[in-house]
Each structure stands twice: as structure tokens, then as C-alpha cells.
């Protein structure tokens, strides 16, 4: 065998830096929002590209989502992935992380013999960082989360994992699941050559069907009772806006800076906020 | 005795040093346990744990499960997973609630435990409460109906400027990870004791598929941002990496202080990631937070808005940070910061020396 079979999990998320679909109070109208590739997943894609560049093999990008999520699979191909799989099925709606992890695990199992699964650390929408480890539990494989650097030597993964105030150097056997930290190396630019061939590909439906595959739960023999609302142990019970706290800022402006500073410090003292004890 | 099972906290320790999140979790668990009339139990895993169980009692645990094994000297996912499962499976019934820290350990371990038990897990909570929940949806009849005394796991969704209450009352344990710096620890009571329950664990060979070669603590990170009493943070308004000299200088006016930053300053390469405050950095709650040249984006705000006193310096009067800072100066930080330092020293230092002698 030459090289490794590498799966990279990517998710399409609302692009909140775009004005479209983002209400003035910051809340998001998902239907109208522009969509993008979860920025955290780019670090995962980069790691996959590094491993393939050194050892050869195949990179398969996988996403679960509604049909437009295909866009990010094409984007992954532009960055250099070999193939894409879209898992789309109405029964997946309202899946929490446990259900999402089961669904994505089912795709990985369907592909068979995957050596490394890379995921982002977390997404910018659900933002839980749970999906990766929950897939690893289903696969019964070891995981390295918060991975910053890695080298694959003799079939083992040597990784550097970020922890509070330092790093851990770890070695694991394969297959393994890796969640990549956002302090890892950023994704390199798309190669012109790849962008060009994806453009061609998108014009040729037959070819496209050999690169980007669309599957539903039945295609991959997944149990529909373990996904969606029925398969999710959690629900979002209620949401409310992140309230504007404060709004009563004592603002010093318009005077000479030295006057403003003096007034501020005097007010701090008068308000008895205990700042005195902090000065050394 | 309550109808409910107890509340369990997984202690977060590195090299036999209990991380502050453990005390925060015990504080939160104490409040929840009172409402349910149940006990607070802690699980601590490691090697040569010594008097760690006692410390857990001081901070609110009623019972402590101890798994003390050489194989647990360093945290690895699979060995700690095995040990935690050994404790949880030895219980007569699953805990009502199981809490972990949203740390690099808790966020690594909790999802595996939740997936193993096929139970719900809410990530990065900033508030935990108990309350009733009526599930009105009929799509899944097994879920419909009123559920008493559920865990309300509340978490912000920064991307969408929302707070969400997540519920999973259908199966115990109801699990959550808590964001560092958001829960209040109990005052430690050194006279408190409790029951220690040693638990044995049988490792499987497959638990050792990952080995730790080395753990390195970076010298530049010796100041723990989450423990500092004063944080002076710099943002993109500094204009360059050298700008952090001004930040450091102001910070040096305070005892027990640390330097923080916005993500934009980190992304610019001006300061290491370890200093980042906010959604994808640290959550801090110091007595005093001074923001220099930081606009106050929601992702920054959620990491520091619980600071007791917030002072913002920004040249733009309309900067969002003035909407939630307690004190603000509109001006050039390069002028303001040195004057602030001087003024703090002259106007306030007097009282301090007295306090210091006393303390
Ligand atoms: C406001 C809000 C709060 C939520 N809170 C919770 C909660 O506390 N607990 C809970 O169980 N669910 C929660 N959910 C549901 C959760 O967002 C979804 O289950 C989602 O499908 C996966 O979680 P995530 O976005 O957090 O991904 P993460 O777990 O943060 O994602 C980690 C990585 O997994 C991979 N990945 C995740 N989703 C996909 C996908 N669809 N396709 C391909 N790869 C993927 C990516 O590589 C990603 O970088 C919440 C949803 C919302 C909107
Ligand atoms: C998923 C995600 C996660 C994120 N996580 C984080 C996070 O953890 N932490 C974080 O901080 N951000 C985070 N961000 C980024 C956040 O949205 C903002 O982009 C960032 O906080 C802006 O940093 P800043 O305030 O330093 O820069 P800017 O927004 O550019 O603000 C600079 C400010 O400096 C002022 N200024 C300029 N010159 C001077 C001067 N001479 N004197 C005084 N004031 C001056 C300006 O008026 C301006 O208000 C995240 C974003 C996303 C999408």
C-alpha cells in the first residue's frame, strides 16, 4: 500500500462577517446568511495536505448538511483534496453533536480503512468542539485534540498538542482521529492548477459525479433512529439575545489627556472600587 | 433522601495540581445539589494523589471517588476515559448531572464519556441552573411532556449573539462542560471532610495506544491570565508589536498583573496566543481589566465582561467597548497609558503600603 487514506471533516457555516442575513443586533437569519467553509476546518485540511505531500495517499473531504454544502466540497478540491462526500438527508435535521458524530462516523465507516480522520477544533456556529472526540469514540480509536504539529513516521503519528500553559508531545498508532488547533499552520493558497480543474469539473456533470459524491443515510447503511431529533439527547430549549450589560460608562473626553486621566483616577477612588489595593 | 441521583464533578488536575476550574465546578455543583437535595461527588484520577481528596472536601465535595494508578500519572484520553467509566459504571445509578471543565482535558474527555453513555453534553456553559422543562414538540413522542428539575445548561453562541439554554432531561447523566472563569468557587472550609471511595480500574492494552513523550510548560506562559488580579490588554490599536511595551509598562504598576490581548493583535503576530482573551482565547474575571486600543467586538467581550472593573482607552468615542466598560477615556493610548500609570502610582500607592504591611 502506498500512502494513507485521510478523511477531513468540513462544515458549512454562516458567514457572519458578511452583512447578508446578519441582523443589526448580531443575530443570524440562517436562510439569508451567506455561507462559508468553517474557518477552523482549514487548519485540518492543511494537515491532511501535509501528510499526503510527504507520504502520498488520498484526501477525502466529508461534509454533512443541506445540498448547498456541496460548495465547500468543491472548495476543498480547489485546495487539493481528491474527493468529496456530501451526506444529506432530511432525517438529519436537528441533530446534536452525538447524532452528528454518529452520522459522520457512518460515512467514515462506509469509506472503509481510513487511517487518519482530521477535524477542525470547533465550528464558528455550534462551537462545541465535541463532534471530533464523539466520532473517535464511535470508531473506537485514539484521538489527539488541539493538535498543532504532526509528523508521521513508520505508521505512527507524532503530534504536538496545546494544553494550558504549554504543550504535550504525543505518539499514537493509526487509525486515529485528530482535531487541529487554530494555532496550527494556516492553509496554503489554492493552486491555480486545482482551481482551474475544479472549474472544468463543475461544467462536466459526469466527471463531477466521480469526484463529489452525494449519499443519504440508506446509502451508507446508517440507522436513522440515531440521528435527527429522535437520535439527539439534547435540544435547544430557549435562546435570547446576549444582553447589553452596563451602558453606564463614565466617559472622560474632550479635555487635555492629563485632565481626563486625573478625573478618572479620582472617580475610581470616589467609587471605592478597591483599585488601591492592586497598585504596587 | 432525594429521588434524584447525585451531582458528579470530574476534577481537573495536571501533575497533581488541581486546576482552578475544579473549584469553580464544585461551587456550581454545590448550588445545584442544594436545589435537588442531593450530594456533590467528585472523581479524581491520577497518581500519588496525596491529600487532593481533602482539598476537594474543603471546596464542597461530600464524597470523592479516587482512582490512583501509575498509568494515570499523565493525562491521556483513553486511560482517563477508562478510569472515569470504571467509577461511573460502579455507581448504583447514573449521576443526575456530570460536570467537567471546558479545558483541554475536559473538552477531550467529556465528549467521549457522553458518546459512550449515549447521553447529552452541553459545551462551554457559562451558567448552570435547575428548572422544569416542558417539551411540546411531538415529532418524537418519547420526548414530549413535562420534565422536572432538569439541568439548564446555558451557553453563549457568539457567532449569533445569542444565549442558548440546552436541555437533555431524557437521560442521565445530564452532562456539561463549564467555561473557565465563569462559575464561582465556594470559600474553602478546611474543617470539611467526607467519604473517600477508592475505585480500581482494569486497563485494556488498547488504552495505551497513545503515549506521552513529554510535557513542556512554556516559560512565557508562567503568568496565568485567568489567575491575575489585574489584566492590561492591548489590541490592534497599538499599531505594532512594540506597542506592547506600553501595555507591559502599565501592567507593571500593579501587583499580580498580566498582559492580555485581542485576537487581532495575536493574529498580527505581535504577541503569543496564550495572551488572547475572548471566545477563542481565555475567559478572565480580574478585579481590574484595562483595554488599550481594543474595539470591544462581541468575541472579545465575552471573554472579559465579567471583570469587576473595566477601563477602556480608545481614540474612537463610538467604539463598542464604551458600551460596557465602567470607565472610559477617549484619547490616544500612547498618551493615556503612561499618564495612567503615573497617576495610579501617585494617587493610590499611599494606601497600599499600609495594606501590604498588614497583609
Ligand atoms: C447555539 C447552538 C448551541 C448548540 N449547543 C450544543 C451543545 O451544547 N451540545 C450539542 O450536543 N449540540 C449543540 N448544538 C448542536 C450542534 O451545533 C450540531 O450538532 C452540529 O451539527 C455539530 O456541532 P458543532 O457545530 O458544535 O461542531 P464542532 O463539534 O464544534 O465541530 C468540530 C469539527 O467537527 C467537524 N464537523 C462538525 N459538524 C460537521 C458537519 N456537519 N459536517 C462535517 N464535519 C463536521 C468539523 O471538522 C468541525 O471543525 C448547538 C447548536 C447551536 C446552534
Ligand atoms: C470565530 C471568531 C472567534 C474570535 N475570537 C476572538 C477572541 O477570542 N478574542 C478577540 O479579541 N477577538 C476574537 N475575534 C475577533 C473579533 O471579532 C475582533 O476582530 C477583534 O477582537 C478585534 O480586535 P481589536 O479590538 O484589537 O481590533 P480593532 O477592532 O481593529 O480595534 C482597534 C481599536 O483600536 C482603536 N485605536 C486605534 N489606534 C488607537 C490609539 N492610538 N489609541 C487608542 N485607540 C486606538 C480603534 O479606534 C479601534 O477601536 C474572533 C472572531 C471570530 C470570527
Image: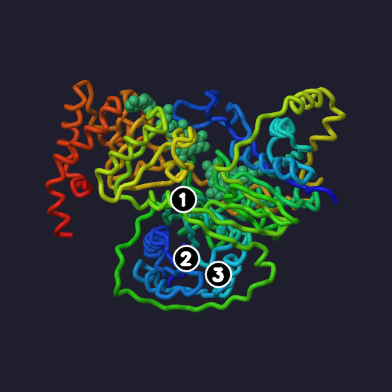
In front here: A39 or B345?
B345
Q: Is there any visible trace of residue B280 in the rendered image? A: yes
Q: Earlier in the sequence, mark 3 or mark 2?
A: 2
Q: Is residue B72 above or below residue B313?
A: below
Q: Where is residue A106 in the image (x, y as percent from the top left)?
A: 74, 51
Q: How far apart are marks 3 and 2 (CA)?
A: 10 Å
Q: What element carries label 1?
A: strand
In front here: B40 or B249?
B249
Q: Residues within 10 Å of mark 1 (few under 14, many from 20)?
A: many
In front here: A255 or B184?
A255
Q: Which of marks 3 and 1 is nearer the N terminus?
A: 3
The chain letter for the residue carrying disc 1 is: B
Q: Distance between the residues labelled 1 and 2?
A: 26 Å
Q: In this view, does A83 lie above or below B125?
A: above
Q: Which residue is drawn at 74% across and 41% down?
A: A53
Q: Where is residue A172 in the image (x, y as percent from the top left)?
A: 67, 59
Q: Which residue carries the number 3 mark?
A: B72
Q: Which residue is drawn at 71% across and 59% down?
A: A173
Same chain under badges 1 and 2? The reply is: yes
Quarter of the image for residue A143 reads bottom right
Res. B15 mark: 2
Asked whether disc 3 touches disc 2, contact meaning CB atoms under 8 Å apart, the reply is no
The chain letter for the residue carrying disc 2 is: B
Q: Which residue is drawn at 49% across and 35% down?
A: B267
Res. B298 mark: none
Dot in front, 1 or 2: 2
Q: Which residue carries the number 1 mark?
A: B125
Amino acid at each position: 500500500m502506498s500512502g494513507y487514506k485521510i478523511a477531513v471533516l468540513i462544515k458549512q457555516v454562516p458567514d457572519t462577517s458578511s452583512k447578508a442575513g446578519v441582523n443589526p443586533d448580531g443575530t443570524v437569519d440562517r436562510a439569508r446568511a451567506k455561507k462559508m467553509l468553517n474557518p477552523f476546518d482549514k487548519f485540518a485540511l492543511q494537515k491532511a495536505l501535509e501528510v499526503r505531500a510527504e507520504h502520498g495517499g488520498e484526501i477525502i473531504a466529508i461534509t454533512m448538511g443541506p445540498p448547498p454544502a456541496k460548495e465547500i466540497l468543491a472548495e476543498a478540491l480547489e485546495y487539493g483534496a481528491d474527493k468529496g462526500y456530501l451526506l444529506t438527508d432530511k432525517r438529519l435535521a436537528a441533530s446534536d453533536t452525538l447524532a452528528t458524530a454518529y452520522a459522520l462516523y457512518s460515512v467514515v465507516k462506509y469509506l472503509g480503512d481510513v487511517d487518519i480522520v482530521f477535524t477542525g477544533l470547533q465550528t464558528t456556529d455550534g462551537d462545541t468542539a465535541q463532534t471530533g472526540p464523539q466520532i473517535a469514540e464511535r470508531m473506537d480509536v485514539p484521538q489527539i485534540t488541539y493538535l498543532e504539529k504532526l509528523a508521521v513516521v513508520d505508521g505512527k503519528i507524532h503530534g504536538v498538542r496545546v494544553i494550558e500553559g504549554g504543550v504535550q508531545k504525543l505518539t499514537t498508532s493509526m487509525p486515529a482521529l485528530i482535531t487541529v488547533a487554530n494555532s496550527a499552520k494556516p492553509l496554503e493558497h489554492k493552486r491555480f492548477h486545482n482551481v482551474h480543474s475544479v472549474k472544468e469539473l463543475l461544467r462536466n456533470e459526469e466527471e463531477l459525479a466521480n469526484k463529489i459524491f452525494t449519499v443519504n443515510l440508506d446509502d451508507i447503511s446508517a440507522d436513522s433512529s440515531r440521528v435527527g431529533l429522535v437520535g439527539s439527547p439534547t435540544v435547544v430549549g430557549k435562546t435570547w439575545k446576549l444582553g447589553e450589560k452596563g451602558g453606564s460608562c463614565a466617559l472622560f473626553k474632550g479635555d487635555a489627556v492629563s485632565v481626563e486621566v486625573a478625573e478618572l483616577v479620582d472617580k475610581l477612588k470616589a467609587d471605592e472600587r478597591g483599585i488601591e489595593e492592586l497598585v504596587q | 433522601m432525594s429521588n434524584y441521583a447525585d451531582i458528579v464533578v470530574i476534577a481537573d488536575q495536571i501533575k497533581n495540581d488541581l486546576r482552578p476550574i475544579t473549584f469553580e465546578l464544585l461551587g456550581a455543583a454545590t448550588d445545584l445539589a442544594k436545589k435537588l437535595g442531593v450530594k456533590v461527588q467528585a472523581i479524581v484520577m491520577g497518581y500519588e494523589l496525596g491529600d487532593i481528596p481533602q482539598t476537594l472536601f474543603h471546596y464542597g465535595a461530600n464524597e470523592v471517588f479516587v482512582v490512583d494508578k501509575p498509568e494515570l500519572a499523565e493525562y491521556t484520553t483513553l486511560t482517563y476515559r477508562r478510569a472515569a467509566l470504571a467509577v461511573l459504571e460502579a455507581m448504583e445509578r447514573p449521576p443526575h448531572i456530570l460536570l467537567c471543565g471546558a479545558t483541554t482535558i475536559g473538552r477531550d474527555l467529556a465528549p467521549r464519556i457522553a458518546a459512550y453513555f449515549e447521553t447529552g453534553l452541553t459545551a462551554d456553559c457559562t451558567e448552570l441552573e435547575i428548572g422544569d422543562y416542558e417539551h411540546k414538540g411531538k415529532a418524537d413522542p418519547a420526548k414530549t411532556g413535562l420534565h422536572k428539575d432538569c439541568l439548564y445548561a446555558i451557553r453563549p453562541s457568539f457567532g449569533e449573539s445569542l444565549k442558548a439554554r440546552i436541555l437533555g432531561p431524557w437521560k442521565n447523566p445530564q452532562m456539561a462542560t463549564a467555561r473557565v472563569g465563569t462559575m464561582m468557587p465556594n470559600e474553602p472550609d478546611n474543617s470539611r471532610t467526607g467519604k473517600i471511595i477508592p475505585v480500581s480500574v482494569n486497563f485494556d492494552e488498547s488504552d495505551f495506544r497513545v503515549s506521552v513523550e513529554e510535557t513542556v510548560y512554556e516559560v512565557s506562559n508562567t503568568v496565568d491570565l485567568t489567575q491575575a488580579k489585574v489584566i492590561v490588554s492591548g489590541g490592534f490599536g497599538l499599531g505594532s508589536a512594540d506597542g506592547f511595551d506600553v501595555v507591559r509598562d502599565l501592567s507593571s504598576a500593579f501587583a499580580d498583573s498580566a498582559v492580555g490581548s485581542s485576537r487581532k493583535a495575536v493574529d498580527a503576530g505581535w504577541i503569543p496566543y496564550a495572551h488572547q482573551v475572548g471566545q477563542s482565547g481565555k475567559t478572565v474575571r480580574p478585579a481590574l481589566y484595562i483595554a488599550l486600543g481594543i474595539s470591544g467586538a462581541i468575541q472579545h467581550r465575552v471573554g472579559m465582561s465579567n471583570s469587576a472593573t473595566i477601563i477602556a482607552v480608545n481614540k474612537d468615542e463610538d467604539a463598542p467597548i464604551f458600551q460596557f466598560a465602567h470607565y472610559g477615556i477617549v484619547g490616544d493610548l500612547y498618551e493615556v497609558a503612561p499618564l495612567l500609570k503615573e497617576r495610579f502610582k501617585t494617587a493610590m500607592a499611599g494606601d497600599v503600603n499600609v495594606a501590604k504591611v498588614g497583609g
